[in-house]
Image (cartoon, helix red, strand yellow):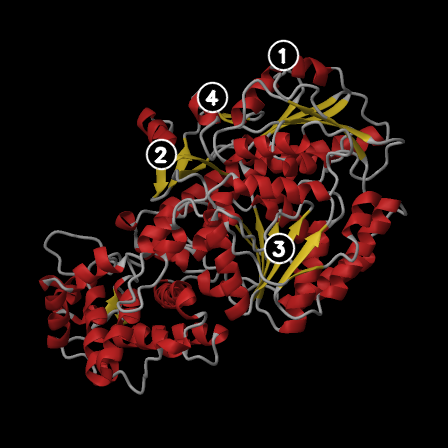
Amino acid sequence: MSEPLAHSGGHSLVDHLQSVAALAGRFAYAWDAVRGSASWVTLAGKWHDLGKYRSGFQRYVRLDEDVHIEHPVTGRKKTHSAAGALWAMQQLEQQHGAPGKLAARVLAYLIAGHHAGLADWESDLAVRLSNADSAQELQDALDALPPQAILDAGDFVPDLKAIPGGKEGFALWVRMLFSCLVDADFLDTEAHFDAGRPARRSGFSTLTQMHQAFNAWMAALPVRDTPVNALRADILRQCRARAAGKPGFFSLTVPTGGGKTLSSLAFALEHAQQHGQRRVIYAIPYTSIIEQTADVFRNVLAALGEEVLVEHHSQAESDPQAETARSRLACENWDAPLIVTTNVQLFESLFAAKTSRCRKLHRIAGSVIVLDEAQQLPPAFLQPILDVLNLLVAHYGVTVLLCTATQPALASTAYFDANKNLRGLKNVREIITDPDALFAALNRVRVQLPTDWNAPTPWEEVAAQLTAEDCVLAIVSTRKAARTLHGLMPPGTLHLSALMCGAHRQAVIAQIKERLRAKREGRDLEPLRVVSTQLVEAGVDMDFPVVYRALAGLDSIAQAAGRCNREGLLAGKGRVVVFVPPEPPPKGALRKAAQACVSTLHGRQADPLARPLFERYFREFYYTQALDAHAIVDKLKVEPRTLAVQFRSAAEAFRLIDDEDSASVVVRYAAQHDEIEKLLRILATEGPQRWLMRKLQRYTVSIPQREANAMLARGDLTLAMPGLYALQDTDNLYSNILGLMADDKLYNPIGFAL
């Protein structure tokens, strides 16, 4: 009989099981060298594909590279993930009695879910493992006489008392183990399928190299002698000095324009160096501005070459039922020391059940996480987010830096109504010695509030006021508002929103910055007017003399003010005008933020951006919200007698974009037309690969799935791969001014305001 295979192309099954076991164990040992987590996932790796020994699977594995993926195919006995789960339950009960039977459920979660994802125990996995098909799957595998070295549990001793964080940490621990298993499985499979393919990259620079390159770049940076730059230098100095502090929670409270981006990276690199942490993860609230921060870092680290970081924001993700071998292997695994990503990717991964999202989770352990604009943490998920951050810091060697101009109220809070209580972050250390003095020194604007908070200003009147200005930025809260206002403005007005792909936004932002520079130097006498969504409020360094901001949360108004007189070069103060737009912000958090802002500022004559106001604003804002609106905490509570957890239900409920699925669309941006065509041809011929998906991100736009379905039906889109669409190559579907053109419904869907 021929040797059993794990995959087509002659991939030995026993070699695969042993390799995955060793690699998964190594991944777990990196974050838990004491409590024995590696032994759990090593055993899971050895047994995860036990079901592939069954003769039905072996007949078909030689025919198709996709046959190892578990989705139903009529007449093909190729399911295999239940066998190892059942074997674990039998073996551990035989060897360790009732405690072993209970502990085996941890392995069952991992093994049975390594294709379909982590399941709910009671309603899903327990039922599946008790049916006759699963029992037959195990029997078929055992009938094939797998090697005893594979079947043997060795000296494994299950110890549920050693779980990081105890019962409160059980769900995260299982997801960490699952991540180790899935990444190891994918990497070994990828190595087999790509054995004859030349490497696309030689490897990323180390954190040590990045730290050295960063310091060299900063030392050589020519800096004008201005009061603002002197303050920035002091902020940088304090960040470097406080990096010696032991890992844990830190906050960096700096006004917009204070140089947070580079100072926070300086802290992260220095801290990681001093404490042996493995990577820096820089998380940003908006997909639409991630390119700006990534490009700043690439520029600073340019001496190390092009591949210094992984920029990860794409939502492209295939349905498990539509997966291919290539789509599974192409999912991101954060294998670089510097990651620039979004809150959506970071936090949905921390609560994920799908293999594609969970894969990178174990790489978060032992990292420095920088939460840029920490005030943007979504209130409906605030409690589970704070809980998981506390666990990461306490048990997984993580440091978290909360980086913002408007520190939210994230300390523990108790109210008479216990449902409003907040379990906050523990022992947060502020980096800046005297934030109040710093805010006073960096006060460069005068804010003009509405005289009547209940009287909206028509768009035509807003447009007239903007047209009267020579150099002005207007920020509104939705895509629809941006297009409406832009349509009323004179020709030549620039537009920014997330309906423009990243490369397009990058080009427009570069144009704006160059024109601002030229106007300061007297080289540009034409009016410069920009209408944007709030994507410019984080990570985009612009310096306008006048900024208009549609009514929003107080933190958003502060961010808008940070685009005004940023360098302090005006003779007087910059002017920030807050106006009440004709339409309120979308329902939900944006509207409640605006209401909390009005409540905080109503009747106030003094500085509306005074630092003490923000704690009052955030407390009021959070009090109006359910801070665990989808009961994530309850879903992830473990039932001690059965180890039952609702993994899948929690993951499905944890959707930061208002519970609406998004679709990633590769657009036809004219300035990069040939590059986009080349990448799409490679995708069509070679299938998805991580390097390719990373490049395509720059040319994608996220829209609601329902709109993608409608455009697909009209023939405006094609399916480039499962989970990723391509816009047809026609001039009327993508504007070089406005971006993706579609029905009005697209411009203001809930959760897609940028």
Classed neighbour count for the residue bearing mark 1: other residues with Cα under 10 Å, few (<14), some (14–19), many (≥20): some
**Alpha-carbon span between mark 2 and mark 3:** 31 Å
Front position in the image: 112 or 172: 172
**Alpha-carbon span between mark 2 and mark 4:** 16 Å
Mark 1 secondary-structure assignment:
helix
Residues at discs 2 and 3 in contact (Cβ within 8 Å): no
> Farthest residue toward the bottom?
155
Question: Who comes first in sequence, dot 1 or dot 4?
Answer: 1
Mark 3 secondary-structure assignment:
loop
Classed neighbour count for the residue bearing mark 3: other residues with Cα under 10 Å, few (<14), some (14–19), many (≥20): few
Question: Who comes first in sequence, dot 2 or dot 3?
Answer: 3
Residue 163: horizontal and vertical position, in percent?
41, 73
Residue 619 shows in the view: yes
Q: Which mark is residue 718?
A: 2
Question: Who comes first in sequence, dot 2 or dot 4?
Answer: 2
Q: Is residue 655 above or below residue 170?
A: above
Residue 3: horizontal and vertical position, in percent?
20, 75
Q: Which residue is mark 3?
A: 306
Classed neighbour count for the residue bearing mark 4: other residues with Cα under 10 Å, few (<14), some (14–19), many (≥20): few
Q: Which mark is residue 460?
A: 1
